[in-house]
């Protein structure tokens, strides 16, 4: 009886409903931070035996086992057929003996996680003894495996063994490279610092190699990520039998590239970002890295430092053009200090603004010889300050008058000033319709409508800038109305613009009370109340009273169907200037289909098709195609089939078909076998 009282003191039993699976009643045992739940309990001093869907949880791990014995005196645990998962890894064993000093696993399978989308070799061992204090252990009769493929089978010292090596392996064949072998292997030199090498071999082209450095450090206040790759190849291919591409650009035999990406975060206030891409040949990444630029097609080299204070944001930014093939035309080192909106003496009036120093290098076509370009360099200080007064006139009706001014000082001696006055007005109201819509499977729907009115008056600047470096480019995007965000000071004359907009959102509620957005429809129109000459046009034509009419729409009649449309209409000629249409079919995880079409000024510019069909979780069929809208010719097509083999290998069969090609054949079949990162 005394032993029973002692066990009640040491162990807390609580009966609760529906806590484990389908059980109607269960048992919970609290052992410090460890909680054990089960269906059945048998107590025989000093052992507590629990069975029936046993769950073990703590702050660090979660586990299940068939049965468990707990010694209330020594606090030791003996588990049978146990599976444990943590943030860093997993373990399963026939028998587990857990004490405060060590963990012993019998007939165990152990592995650690290496991040999202990655796996690492797992270890099978007859017996593993792990020291909880030293966080080290030894495994007896152990072997490393990738899937079911054994790697090594000597005795292994267990500690950080599985984190010491990272490897990415890819083999395959393409028509332009022949058989190829990609290998990137890194060793954990110190803590989060990894050093390794690229080693790529191509039967038709030679060997590409170079060092790799990776840093992934995440602490409480500092997060740092760095990925640096350097590669060199002495191409022994025929290089199209003439050593140059279709544009006449020379294709060098020896080529280099440096690709570096880094970001550092210091607390909540400082971010440091940079991207560097240098290459002796602009297409070396496409030619040899096989998808190395798929995640980003912006070939840019820049650096940025952001410091966020309570009231201000300081940004240092620079962009450099390191390669002749980089297609951006501006190099901009810039220093910008921005003040967030701040209230003035509890008056309800807010002030805000920024100061920006920029030095810009650009190129533009010569007026006399259009084939040639001339370089322009210019420095200026851009200073904008404004005030506004948000006012709520009624429930859902907001009116915000504002005023501001921009002063631009060109370091060559020219000054420009623009004043701004205006207002923003927004109205929000909605309507509920209880009528059911069968084809939407909705029992009721809601319509939210927001009429918007914006007015801006800009004072004239007198004359244009000397070099016209900031002229507004012609594009199909919705024009900026806020003076603070405008950079085209050289062609901003006195303007009086009234922007009218109508935004609509539609929501549906299903029988299960789930709400989703089914449609949106937005209209915008500018009225040029002061019809001055448009300095951005070389012909200096008079501005029209009505600007182009902009329409943004999206329709989601089903969860698997999404329709988007952006269009720009010319009121004067009653014609369509631009239409961008996109259709996406998504059927859960089974298949996807996307259709894209773009019209620019009466001409169909391009069609796009992308299709993906998933046979199961690890195998899929893909199709991507681009079609020239003007000629109707096929620009490029890629057909691929991807499957997973033995849980760790991605096998991909693909074929690329191009209408024309500068460096490689039009028909490019190939395959690759890719070891998932570990």
Image (cartoon, rainbow, N blue to C red):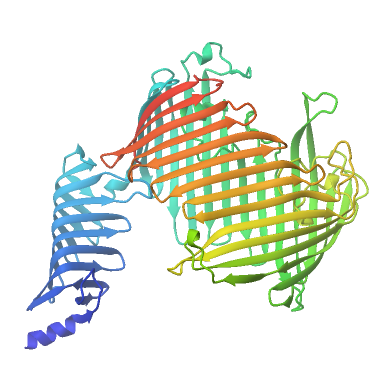
User: Is residue 412 found left or right of 346 in the rendered image?
Assistant: right
Vertical side of 519 occupied by 12: above or below: below
Vertical side of 558 occupied by 49: above or below: below
Q: How many marks?
A: 0
Picture coordinates of residue 316, whole percent (x, y): 66, 50
**Front position in the image: 547 or 302:** 547
Q: Is residue 621 visible?
A: yes
Vertical side of 81 occupied by 71: above or below: below
Q: Is residue 181 visible?
A: no
Look at 72% across and 73% down and name the residue there. 397
Name the quadrant of the N terminus.
bottom left
Look at 63% across and 64% down and name the residue there. 309
**Front position in the image: 383 or 62:** 62
Residue placed furthest toward the top: 241
Give the image quarter of residue 582. top right
Picture coordinates of residue 647, whole percent (x, y): 28, 42
Picture coordinates of residue 499, whole percent (x, y): 78, 58
Give the image quarter of residue 301. top right
User: Is residue 431 found left or right of 260 in the rendered image?
Assistant: right
Picture coordinates of residue 241, whole percent (x, y): 52, 11
């Amino acid at each position: 009886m005394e032993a029973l009282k002692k066990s009640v003191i040491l162990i807390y039993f609580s009966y609760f409903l529906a806590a484990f699976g389908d059980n109607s009643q269960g048992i919970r045992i609290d052992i410090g931070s460890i909680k054990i739940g089960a269906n059945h309990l048998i107590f025989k001093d000093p052992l507590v035996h629990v069975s029936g869907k046993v769950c073990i949880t703590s702050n660090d791990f979660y586990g299940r086992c068939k049965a468990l014995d707990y010694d209330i005196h020594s606090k030791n645990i003996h588990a049978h057929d146990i599976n444990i998962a943590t943030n860093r890894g997993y373990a399963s064993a026939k028998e587990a003996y857990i004490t405060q000093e060590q963990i012993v696993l019998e007939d165990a399978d152990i592995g650690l996680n290496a991040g999202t989308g990655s796996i690492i070799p797992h270890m099978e061992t007859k017996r593993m003894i792990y020291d909880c204090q030293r966080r080290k252990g030894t495994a007896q009769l152990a072997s490393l495996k990738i899937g079911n493929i054994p790697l090594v089978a000597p005795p292994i010292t267990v500690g950080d063994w599985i984190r010491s090596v990272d490897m990415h392996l890819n083999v395959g064949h393409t028509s332009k490279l022949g058989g190829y072998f990609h290998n990137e292997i890194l060793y954990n030199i110190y803590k989060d610092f990894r050093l390794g090498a690229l080693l790529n071999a191509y039967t038709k082209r030679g060997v590409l190699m170079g060092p790799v450095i990776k840093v992934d450090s995440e602490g409480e206040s500092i997060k740092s990520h760095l990925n640096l790759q350097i590669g060199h190849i002495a191409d022994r291919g025929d290089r199209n039998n003439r050593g140059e591409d279709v544009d006449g650009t020379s294709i060098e035999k020896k080529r280099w590239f440096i690709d570096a990406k880094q970001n550092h975060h210091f607390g909540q206030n400082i971010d440091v970002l940079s991207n560097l891409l240098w290459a002796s040949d602009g297409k070396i990444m496409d030619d040899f890295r096989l998808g190395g630029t798929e995640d980003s097609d912006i070939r840019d080299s820049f650096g940025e430092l952001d410091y966020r204070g309570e009231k201000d944001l300081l940004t240092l930014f620079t962009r450099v053009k390191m390669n002749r093939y980089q297609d951006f035309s501006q190099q901009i080192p810039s220093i910008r200090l921005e003040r967030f909106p701040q209230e003035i003496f509890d008056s309800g009036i807010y002030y805000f603004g920024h100061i920006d120093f920029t030095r810009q290098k650009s190129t533009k076509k010569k007026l006399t010889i259009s084939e040639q370009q001339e370089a322009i360099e210019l420095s200026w200080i851009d200073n904008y300050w404004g005030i506004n007064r948000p006012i709520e006139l009624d429930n859902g009706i907001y009116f915000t008058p504002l005023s501001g001014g921009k002063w631009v000082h060109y370091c060559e001696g020219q000054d420009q000033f623009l004043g701004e006055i205006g207002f923003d007005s927004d109205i929000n109201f909605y309507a509920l319709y209880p009528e059911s819509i069968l084809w939407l499977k909705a029992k009721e729907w809601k319509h939210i409508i927001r009429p918007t009115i914006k007015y801006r008056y800009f004072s004239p600047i007198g004359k244009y800038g000397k070099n016209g470096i900031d002229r507004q480019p012609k594009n199909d995007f919705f024009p900026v109305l806020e003076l603070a965000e405008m950079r085209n000071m050289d062609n901003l004359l006195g303007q009086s613009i009234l922007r009218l907009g109508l935004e609509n959102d539609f929501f549906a509620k299903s029988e299960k009370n789930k709400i989703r957005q089914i449609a949106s429809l937005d209209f915008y129109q500018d009225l040029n109340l002061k019809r001055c000459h448009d300095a951005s046009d070389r012909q200096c034509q008079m501005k029209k009273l009505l600007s182009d009419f902009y329409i943004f729409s999206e329709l989601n009649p089903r969860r698997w169907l999404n329709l988007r449309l952006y269009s720009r209409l010319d009121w004067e000629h009653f014609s369509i200037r631009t239409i961008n249409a996109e259709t996406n079919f998504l059927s859960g995880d089974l298949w996807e289909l996307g259709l894209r079409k773009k019209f620019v000024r009466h001409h169909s510019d391009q069609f796009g098709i992308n299709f993906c069909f998933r046979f199961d979780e690890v195998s899929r069929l893909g199709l991507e195609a681009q079609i020239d809208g003007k000629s109707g010719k096929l620009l490029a097509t890629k057909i691929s089939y991807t499957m997973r083999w033995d849980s760790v290998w991605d096998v991909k069969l693909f074929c690329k078909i191009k209408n024309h090609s500068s460096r490689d054949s039009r028909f490019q079949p190939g395959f690759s076998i890719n070891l998932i990162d570990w």
